[in-house]
Amino acid sequence: MKTKSVSNSTKSSFKLNYKRTMLIGFAFFGILLLWQVYDSWCPTFLSELFKEAFHTDNETEVQYLVGIMMAMDNLAALILLPIFGHLSDKTKTPIGKRMPYILVGTFVCATSFPFIPVLFHYHNMAGTIAMMAIVVVFSMMYRNPAVSLMPDMTPKPLRSKANGIINIMGYVGGACGTFAGVAFVLSDYLGENSENWLAGPTHSNIWIIEIPFLLASALMLISAIVLFFTIKENKIEKEMEPEMKRGEEVTETADAVSDEAPLSKANRTMLFLILAAEFFWFMADNGIGTFMGNYTLYYLHSSTSSNQVNTIIGGLGSVLGFAFGGYIAAKIGRKWTAFTGLGLTGAALAIWAILTFAIPVPASTGSDNPFPWYLFIIWGVKGFGMSLVHVNSYPMVVELCTSKKIGAYTGYYYASSMAAQTVTPVALGSMLLVLGHSDAWKFLPIYAVTCLAISFVIFAFVKNVKTSKTEIKVGLEGIGTDED
C-alpha cells in the first residue's frame, strides 16, 4: 500500500518547539562530551600501556591491540544499544520510559570516568581497561534512550530540523571536551619520546590528564540534572499525542507504516540500504577518529593540542551543517541532502590522501613539527559534509516505524554504526601492523576514502521520498511553548 495522500487537517502547519528541543539536546550534550574526551585520550593511553608491556618503542607494532580494545568497546555497544532501546520502549515509570536509563547511566559513567587517567598514570593496564569497560557499558544504558527522546516528542516532518538542534547541543558538549584537550596537552604529559611517563608516576603531572575527565564528568551530571527538571516526559508525550498522530500521515517512506503490519518490501529495502551505507561511512569516520590522535603524535610529530584545534574546526563545520541540514532537506529531500554530504566528505578525504603523499613530513624526534595547515580546511569540509549525513540519516530510519518502536529502530541505527566501529579499529590497526613502519600512517586517508566511496555507491540506491504537502513554520512563527 502506497503512502496515502494528506488530508486538509494534516496539511496544516507543524511548528517545532525550539526551546524544548534544545533542552532535550542536553542528553546528547552529555553523550558527545563523554566520547570526545574518551576518543581523544584513551587510544594513546592504550598505546603507551601496550608499548610498555611489550617493551617496544615502535608504536605501529601495538596499534592492532589498540584497535582491538577500541573495537571491544563498540562490540559491547552493538549488543547493548538495541537491548536498552527495546527495554526503554516497554518501560513505564512516573518519570517516563527513557529517563530512568538516562539518569542511572549518566551517574555511573560520571563517577567512573575520572578513574581512567588515574589508573593509567599509575601504569595499571588491567585497571585502566576495566574502568573503560564500565564507562562503555553504562554509557550504552543512556545513549539509546537519550537519542530516542527527540523523535518521541517531535512529529516526523520536523525531525531533521530537530535532529540538527540536538546535534548542535551535542557538539557544544564535544567542544567542551576538545577545549580541555587544548588546555591540557597529552604530549606535554608524556614528554619527549614518552620518557617522563615511562620513568614513573612522579615524573609526570597527573592533573594534565585528570582535569579533562573531571570536567567531563561534572558537565555530564549537570546536563542530566537540567534534562530531568525541564523535560517531564510523560506529560509532554500526552500533550504531543495528537500532533504525533498527524505527523504519521505525512511520513516520507515508500509505503505506509503500521504497528499491525510488518515493513513492506520497499520500506525494508530502504532500511537495509540506509544501514549498509551508514556502516561504511562510520567505517571511514570512526577509523580516522580513533587513530587521528596517534597519527598526529607518532607520524606528524605535532603537538596533540593541534589535533584538538583541528577537531574544533571540524566541529564548527558540523554545527553549520546541523543548522542548515534540515532546511536543505526541506527543499531537496533528506536523501539528496545526505548524498551531497557524502560527496563533500569524500572529496575532502581524497584531497587529504593526495596531499599526504605529495607533501613530506619533516623529520623529528619529538612533537615540535607544525600541524599541516591543509588539514584544518579538510576537517572543516568533512565536518560540514558528515553533519548533512547525520542530521538526515537518523530521521530516515525512525521514519520507518511508529512511535511505539522508536527505541528499537534507534537501536538498529546504532547497531549499524557500532558494528562499523567494532570492525574499523581492528581493520585499520591490523593494516598499520602489516605495513609495519612509520610511513604506514600515510594510508589512513586512503582507508577512509575507500570506505566512504563504498557508502556513497550504496546510498545512491536509497529511494528518495519527499513530501511537499506539509507546511512547516519557521523563524519566530515556528517557536512553540511547552503548552503547544
Image (tube, rainbow, N blue to C red):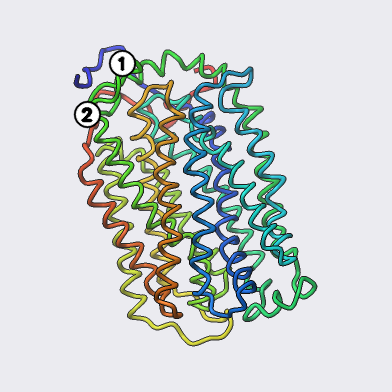
The quadrant holding residue 124 is: bottom right
Q: In the drawing, what numbered circle is on residue 265?
A: 2
Residue plotted at (47% across, 35% down): 82
Residue sitting farthest toward the bottom: 363
Residue at image mark 1? 10
Amino acid type, residue under disc 2 in the picture: Lys
Front in this rendered view, residue 356 or 313: 356
Picture quadrant of residue 15: top left
Is 76 rendered above or below residue 476? below
Q: How many marks?
A: 2
Specify which label sits upstream in the sequence, 2 or 1.
1
- Name the residue at 72% across, 45% down: 111
Three-letter amino acid code at the position of disc 1: Thr
Where residue 175 appears, as percent x and y from the top left, is 56, 53
Q: Is residue 242 left or right of residue 51?
A: left
**Mark 2 residue element:** helix
Q: Secondary structure at mark 1?
A: helix
Can you give x and y, in whole percent of width and height, for residue 279 in the image? 36, 48
Residue lying at 34% horizontally and 38% vertically, measured from the top left? 327
Position in image of residue 458 (x %, y %): 24, 48
Q: Is residue 234 left or right of residue 475?
A: right
Q: Residue furthest right?
A: 202
**On residue 129, which mark appears?**
none
In-front residue for pair 197/345: 197
| Disc 1 crowd, CA 10 A, few/some/many (<14, 14-19, 20+) | some
Relative horizontal placement of residue 385, taking residue 418 as reference (left or right): left
Name above or below for residue 228 compared with residue 375. Answer: above
